[in-house]
Image (spheres, helix red, strand yellow):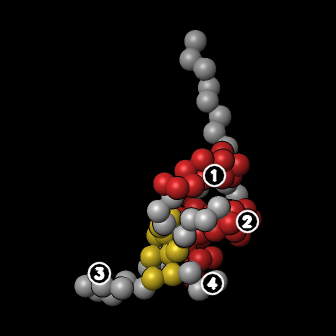
Amino acid sequence: MAESIKQKLMKASDIPAFVDDVIRAGCGICAVGHDKYVLGDGEAVADELDDIENKYGERDFLKAEIAAYLRSIGRCVDVGADGAG
């Protein structure tokens, strides 16, 4: 019998705390455009980022909301039509 795997999903209300935890871990995070975001070089803090991911759960479905929050706090890069920032 196949075992059901229940994965934790991040809530939209967790976005500010998630962003704060990523920054506090020493990893940059910023929105790129209106529907994407990137984490900076997290290699040095990989263990902390793993802990953060385990704490908050799956967040891919919240990309646009995370990007919107990052834009609202000024952590963003606007990309022009030619892809230049």
Amino acid type assigned to the residue bearing label 1 in the image: Glu
The residue that label 2 is drawn on is 17
Q: Position of residue 81 (x, y in %)?
A: 29, 86
Q: Earlier in the sequence, mark 3 or mark 4?
A: 4
Residue 53 in view of the camera: no
Distance in Å between CA atoms under marks 3 and 2: 30 Å
Q: Are marks 1 and 4 in contact (CB under 8 Å)?
A: no
Q: Nearer the viewer, mark 2 or mark 1?
A: 1
Q: Residue furthest top?
A: 1
Q: Nearer the viewer, residue 29 or 82?
A: 29
Q: Residue at x 52, y 74 (%)?
A: 30
Mark drawn on residue 83: 3
Q: Nearer the viewer, mark 3 or mark 1?
A: 1
The residue that label 1 is drawn on is 48
Q: Earlier in the sequence, mark 2 or mark 1?
A: 2
Disc 2, SS: helix
Q: Residue at x 36, y 85 (%)?
A: 85
Distance in Å between CA atoms under marks 3 and 1: 31 Å
Q: Residue at x 56, y 81 (%)?
A: 75
Distance in Å between CA atoms under marks 1 and 4: 25 Å
Q: Earlier in the sequence, mark 3 or mark 1?
A: 1
| Mark 3, other Cα within 10 Å: few <14 / some 14–19 / many ≥20 | few
Q: Are marks 4 and 2 in contact (CB under 8 Å)?
A: no
Mark drawn on residue 72: 4
Distance in Å between CA atoms under marks 4 and 2: 14 Å
Q: Position of residue 4 (x, y in %)?
A: 62, 26
Q: Position of residue 9 (x, y in %)?
A: 65, 49
